[in-house]
Amino acid sequence: MIREGTEVAIVGGGLVGAAIAWGLARVGKRVTILDEGDDAFRASRGNFALVWVQSKGLGMAAYAAWSVRSSDAWASLASALKDETSIDVAHQRPGGLMLSLSEDEQERRVAQMRRLHNQPEMIPYPYEVLDQAQTKKLLPDIGPQVAGSIYCPLDGHVNSLKLFRALHAALAARGVLYRPNRPVETIASRDGRFVLSGSWGELRAEKIVLAAGNGNARLAPQVGLHAPVRPQRGQIIVTEKAKPFLNYPLVTVRQTDEGGVMIGDSLEEVGFENVATTPITATMADRAVRMFPMLAGLNVVRTWSALRVMSQDGFPIYDQSETHPGAFLATCHSGVTLAANHAFDIAPQIAAGRLDDALLPFSARRFHVPQAA
Ligand SMILES: Cc1cc2nc3c(=O)[nH]c(=O)nc-3n(C[C@H](O)[C@H](O)[C@H](O)COP(=O)(O)OP(=O)(O)OC[C@H]3O[C@@H](n4cnc5c(N)ncnc54)[C@H](O)[C@@H]3O)c2cc1C
């Protein structure tokens, strides 16, 4: 395939690539997305669907502010996608909770939130520490083992499969070319353009965005970028549909807009391995039932695992190559939460050819620490 006229080629059609492509199309760019096939590792199809703020940014205050910004912009994203595609992605922002199953756990969580908010340059956001009785007012079905919780009004959730579908429908409507089964093997520069190629052929573009999830680690060095990311497995359980009982998403339990209860999600260092395993799902189910004893009466209908895209320090990486200007990198482990920023902030900056200085903390240059003599 040789297609002239692509201004920006995006490698990877997951949530990060799709949100940036949509943002670029909104500012008038001609965009082509090159993606792998349906058997690819794709975090975007297996996530927990939180638009989450609380607890994010310990170690990098800029990431906390970046998460708040996206959470604030999410309603506009949902409404723009609904206008363009008629798909309601079921975004809700009632606030969210992290429940503790012992006093010790609650103390640890509270201490962590204090450390987060006491960091230099942290812009504080609202949260409340709730005891058992206060938690029960919000969540009447909690069990006696719940010791307390932390509530943050900025947290929310969506239907992330509908989000994925809405983004791709909006891309098609705006004329973005989505090309599956086009794994990019090599990227070269020729006559002032990038040439992306694989066994399927080649594509030339003025700019490129590497949004290939865990695939970025291999592609980035070809254009002078650095993407130290690794897969991190997470498992999820889904129950049969139940009557609405959970009006707030929790970091590990949420009721979807369709009624099923999602229970998640583990953090496992197992490489490129995405099978679901009973010991992990049993532990997750046990904690969820201690939080909400009524869950024991629901049938599990599905379990799965998927691979996160995790950087060395857990924070996003946004960069433009110094050696290959016009080559951009975007990767993060919270692509649902950050979808609004990717569409409304990152995409226009890529279109303009320069990432804002406000994004400097997210450059991979932070990993280039000189070796001690
Ligand atoms: C269990 C779990 C729970 C999660 N929960 C949440 C949550 O609650 N909230 C939240 O915000 N985020 C959550 N996430 C993270 C979120 O799903 C990811 O941040 C997001 O999906 C990452 O999107 P991505 O596009 O970078 O990566 P992916 O979805 O992995 O997509 C990368 C794409 O690049 C393609 N690709 C790779 N290499 C190449 C190549 N060489 N050529 C062409 N294409 C290539 C792949 O085929 C794939 O389609 C969760 C993730 C997991 C696994």
Image: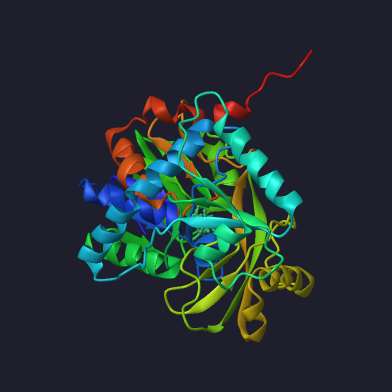
Identify the residue at horizontal 33%, vertical 48% (top origin).
73
Q: Quadrant of residue 207?
A: top left
Residue 86's x, y, as percent?
24, 71
Q: Give me the residue at 50% from left, 24% from top.
A: 121
Query: Which x, y percent locates residue 122?
Result: 50, 29
The answer to which of 243 and 268 lies nearer the viewer is 243
Q: Is residue 370 above or below residue 109?
A: above
- Percent x, y of residue 173: 23, 64
**164 or 371, nearer to the observer:** 164
Q: Is residue 12 visible?
A: no
**Quarter of the image that includes the N terminus:** bottom left
Q: Classify 218 as above or below 302.
A: above
Total numbered labels placed on residues in the image: 0
Q: Is residue 41 above or below residue 368?
A: below
**At which x and y percent is residue 183?**
50, 58
Could you tell whether 191 is left or right of 241 in the image? left
